[in-house]
Amino acid sequence: MQSVSLFVAIALRQARRDRQLVSKRLLLNEDEDISMETIPADQVRVKQKIFCDIYVFFYLPFFSQENSMHLLVSFLTGSNTQCRLHAIRCLHELSHSPHPSVAPTCLPATSYLLTYLSGQSTKFTELCLYTLGNLIPDSDVVKEKLLAQGIIPALASCIENQRHHLAVVEAASFTLSQLLQAKDAAETIMSKVLVSTLPSQLLSVLTPDPQFGLAPAIECAWCLHYMACSQNGKELLACGALSKCSSLLWSLGCAVREGNQDEGLELLVCPLLRCVGNLLSFCPANSLTDQVGDVKLVVALSAFVQAYIHSRPALARESAWVLNNLTAHSTDFCSALLTHNLVPALIQSLAFSEGINTMILRVLANIANKKKEFCVELVQQGLLSSLCATLKMADAEMVTLSLEVLFMLVSRRPLPRSGLQTRSRCLQRIKVCSTLHGTKQNSVNTQPETHLAQQQGQCGAER
């Protein structure tokens, strides 16, 4: 890349992953010192204050003058290439300011910025895209104006024409993600995006480029996640989104299993997990295997749980959440966990907190609920002894789930005739325990439903 984003480094992407922040991007000039080091949060705040001060002391006096923006627009639309580049640079730096009056001030320039998305200069197009992306979150007026001016078809055309220039694809996906994060996106934006060519284009550029890096794929994955969070999951399923994202997760899971811990890899895994997990709730049970493509996806998800359980527990929890949704209505995926000998590692994960053990226990409950034979295998792999430990935990939900799983294991385990009375007494004791526990929380459901969850915008991370 000839230019990189000062705030595009891992700090802001991680902040968006953890807290769903709307970020802004500032591109450096080619002759400026380029550093890809992560910027600490306190430095980010300091830099934001500096930009605000710069706006107040330098830009504000200029833009308070009558027709000042129109003057800048005249440079932007003039025939002098150098003046146009300086004008877009000025607008871009202005758009990065957190001052609330910036976006309305730049409104006269938006139609020209959209027009230039079809230009020949990738550098100029990239600046236009990031400028638009920075302006969108700050003003509903600007957002509505851009929608009326055709920003969605403009972005679709831009990605189609520039699909081989990944820096532009990344910038266009960032701008789209800013739109999709709007509070009213589900009502005013999502339908326009879904009827466009954007979903298929995002899927076509989702695979990371080994030379360019993960950045474009990360931005595309976030866009798909925001779409999957809406109630339009069936449209994404029809585009093959679940199959594509599952396939990419499988590839990343294989890399993680082989010890690949490249910096930034988890930033792609996170939105892919959220996208797949939410799309599973729209997928009919009888077509789940066809949509996902390969039952070995459970191997990748289990690899994420084990790889991130210590270093990034939030990501391990989200991996377990997708496992939960995957096994909720599928005997095939439950069987795959047993066939690939993944259950022992999951059982060991019951000792961890931060919601990981709860989600893992839900997965084990899904397995036990499918077949009596699965219950036998779970017992053989040591689940009963682990339940003895989870029943002693202070977490009320863990105790309830443990009783639920214990009831299934005991009631479905084949016994000789002489053991039937013993099992009957054991089941009665479990019911008594669940009744006593129900004074603090609802008692265990002895005929449990499978646990299928859909998580919306802020799901499973350090929020």
Image (cartoon, rainbow, N blue to C red):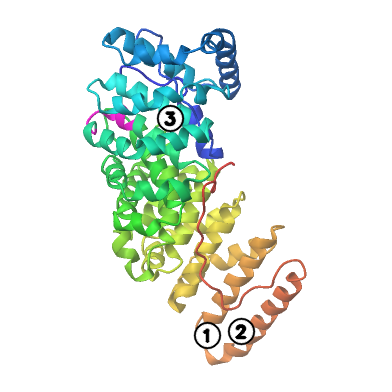
Mark 3 Cα-neighbour bin, 10 Å: few <14, some 14–19, many ≥20: many
Q: In the visual, does 413 lie left or right of 373? A: right
Task: State the CA–CA distance, disc 3 to disc 1.
Answer: 64 Å
Q: Position of residue 249 (x, y in %)?
A: 35, 48
- Mark 2 or mark 3, which is nearer the start of the sequence? 3
Q: Is residue 311 visible?
A: no
Badge 2 amino acid: Arg
Q: Which residues are magenta?
A: 163-170
Position of 349 relative to 170 (above/below):
below
Q: In the visual, does 423 lie left or right of 225? A: right
Check whether the beta carbons of the residues at disc 3 and disc 2 lie within 8 A of each other.
Answer: no
Position of 166 relative to 415 (above/below):
above
Taking the spot 41% from the left edge, 62% from the top edge, the residue there is 282
Residue at the spot of label 1: 415
Q: Quadrant of the N terminus?
A: top left
Residue 268 inside the magenta-drawn segment: no
- Mark 1 or mark 3, which is nearer the start of the sequence? 3
Position of 386 relative to 64 (above/below):
below
Taking the spot 29% from the left edge, 40% from the top edge, the residue there is 207
Badge 3 amino acid: Gly
Residue at the spot of label 2: 423
Q: In the visual, does 301 lie left or right of 392? A: left
Place residue 111 in its image quadrant. top left
- Mark 2 or mark 1, which is nearer the start of the sequence? 1
Q: Position of residue 439 (x, y in %)?
A: 77, 70
Q: In the visual, does 437 lie left or right of 88? A: right
